[in-house]
């Protein structure tokens, strides 16, 4: 049994709380390439309790463009909450939010003797910001704290966004300072900061950013790629608009651009250089095409590896019922092994489409193929295909069905998820769902083991019936 509640303190302040929440009706994450990834894989939040008013916790400049931190508060870090509470609202020009949750997953399935074994992880996050000058200008502050048994992490910081009315100039910045105590008692501190400035008009876009992360910076509530580096980048683009009556009238805007980035990685012990010249085309039927070349080099475990890839991407609304696109890129890549890394070459092909023949039926499908070879010998290292499919049908205003089918040849997984829902009225819903995961496994020595030669066997199967009742007073 689970219980959720919402209370409107005033017309602008709301309290949300949940105990033993269940999110079984939330759709599965789409499969992504997880082989040979230097940085962690980002999965967006889909659970309603955490999604509502989540924008309050965004920091200026974070998650925009090519910064290292994608989110200062990434609630997917709270894996299995047993309880949670949230206060969000506004007072005059100030908006604020406080989020707290207890995560049971953090202390589960750890090795015997681990000091964190059996300890839940408690998240507490506070955020406030106030606007001034114009709607695009504000200053804010954030505090994030987590505790799990003997371990703890506290982060405090501030951010600012400046945008003058009727001006093309905009500036953003943030600074965070962390203090962490590990389970063994070791204490670390670190600084993270990011500053961005740019101008955007109908003709040109100029943007620059600098960021720095101490090696010991730690923020448990955030999603970021790495620490221990300092870098900066600049972007410049100029827009051309073909004449409306020219032979190229279907092209609405042409933007040649260049992106340059450079920095020092103190963890991998080397310089990081990236240069990307390219062109973007904005076309009729919501069409878009981009082609560029990625050059430079990157450090990995004290060695320098070459970049050099051609990339192209395009999409369009071909018909009222069909939209789609694709991507192709080919060139040098790095095999990120900490013991035996090497220079490689990879090719990535992908295609996607949304088919909606009528207002009731919608089909979204995505296909991706990645091939990776050694650059010196041409030997094949891995070759994988990922397919994600999502089919929905709206029988009536109240009844809805969804089928998700996903296949990943690298991890030998086939996932099938089916869901049906009937909504009597908003908040009062009945769900029925079935899920099945198949993997290549063999039962040997009283346990299941991965086996690439085995047929796909069902490793998990689940059926659930769920009723949610909303009472208003």
Image (cartoon, helix red, strand yellow):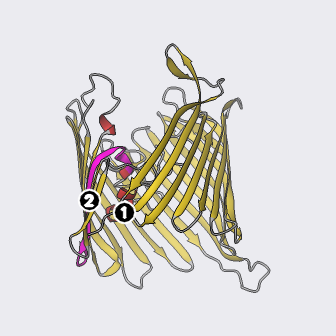
The answer to the question of whether label 2 and label 1 lie on touching residues, with beta carbons closer than 8 A, is yes
- Residue at 31%, 50% in the rendered image: 2
Q: Which image quarter is the C terminus in?
A: bottom left
Question: Quick one: 470 or 4, which is closer to the camera?
Answer: 470
Q: Is residue 91 magenta?
A: yes
Identify the magenta region: 76-95
- Residue at 42%, 67% in the rendered image: 425
Question: Quick one: 466 or 307, which is closer to the camera?
Answer: 466
Residue 285: percent from the left, percent from the top?
Answer: 69, 74
Mark 1, secondary structure of its residue: loop
Q: Compared to 412, does 463 lie above or below?
A: below
Label 2 crowd bin: few (<14), some (14–19), many (20+), radius 10 Å: many
Residue 80, visible in the rendered structure? yes
Q: Compared to 372, does 291 lie above or below?
A: below
Residue 294 falls left or right of residue 6? right
Give the residue at mark 2: 86
The circle drawn on residue 52 is 1
- Residue at 45%, 56% in the rendered image: 430
Report the magenta stretch's main SS: strand
């Amino acid at each position: 049994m689970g219980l959720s509640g919402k209370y409107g303190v005033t017309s602008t302040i709301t309290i949300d709380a949940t105990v033993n929440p269940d999110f079984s009706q939330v759709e599965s994450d789409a499969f992504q390439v997880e082989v040979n990834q230097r940085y962690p894989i980002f999965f967006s939040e889909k659970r309603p309790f955490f999604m509502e008013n989540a924008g309050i916790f965004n920091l200026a400049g974070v998650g925009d463009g090519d910064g290292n931190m994608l989110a200062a508060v990434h609630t997917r870090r709270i894996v299995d909450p047993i309880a949670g509470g949230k206060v969000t609202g506004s007072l005059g020009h100030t908006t604020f939010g406080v989020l707290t949750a207890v995560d049971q997953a953090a202390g589960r399935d750890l090795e015997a003797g681990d000091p964190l074994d059996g300890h839940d992880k408690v998240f507490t996050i506070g955020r406030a910001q106030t606007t001034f000058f114009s709607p695009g200008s504000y200053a804010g502050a954030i505090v994030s704290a987590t505790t799990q048994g003997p371990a703890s992490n506290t982060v405090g910081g501030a951010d600012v966004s400046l945008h003058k009315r009727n001006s093309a100039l905009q500036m953003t910045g943030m600074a965070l300072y962390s203090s962490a105590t590990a389970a063994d008692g070791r204490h670390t501190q670190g600084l993270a900061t990011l500053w961005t400035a740019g101008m955007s008009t109908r003709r040109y876009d100029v943007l620059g950013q600098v960021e720095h992360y101490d090696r010991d910076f730690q923020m448990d509530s955030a999603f970021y790629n790495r620490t221990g580096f300092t870098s900066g980048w600049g972007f410049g683009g100029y827009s051309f608009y073909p004449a409306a009556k020219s032979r190229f009238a279907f092209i609405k805007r042409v933007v040649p651009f260049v992106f340059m980035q450079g920095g020092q990685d103190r963890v991998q012990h080397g310089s990081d250089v990236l240069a990307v010249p390219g062109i973007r085309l904005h076309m009729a039927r919501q069409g878009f095409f981009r082609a560029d070349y990625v050059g430079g080099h990157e450090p990995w475990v004290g060695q320098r590896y070459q970049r050099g890839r051609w990339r192209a991407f395009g999409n369009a609304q071909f018909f009222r019922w069909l939209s789609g696109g694709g991507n192709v890129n080919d060139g040098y890549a790095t095999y990120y092994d900490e013991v035996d890394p090497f220079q490689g070459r990879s090719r990535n092909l992908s295609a996607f489409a949304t088919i909606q023949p009528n207002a009731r039926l919608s089909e979204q499908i995505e296909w991706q193929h990645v091939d990776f070879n050694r650059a010196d010998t041409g030997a094949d290292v891995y070759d994988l295909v990922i397919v994600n499919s999502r089919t929905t049908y709206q029988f009536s205003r109240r009844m809805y069905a969804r089928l998700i089918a996903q296949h990943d040849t690298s991890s030998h997984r086939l996932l099938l998820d089916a869901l049906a829902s009937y909504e009597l009225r908003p908040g009062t819903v009945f769900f029925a769902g079935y899920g099945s995961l198949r993997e290549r496994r063999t039962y040997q020595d009283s346990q299941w083991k991965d086996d690439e030669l085995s047929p796909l066997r069902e490793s998990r199967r689940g059926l659930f019936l769920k009723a949610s009742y909303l009472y208003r007073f």
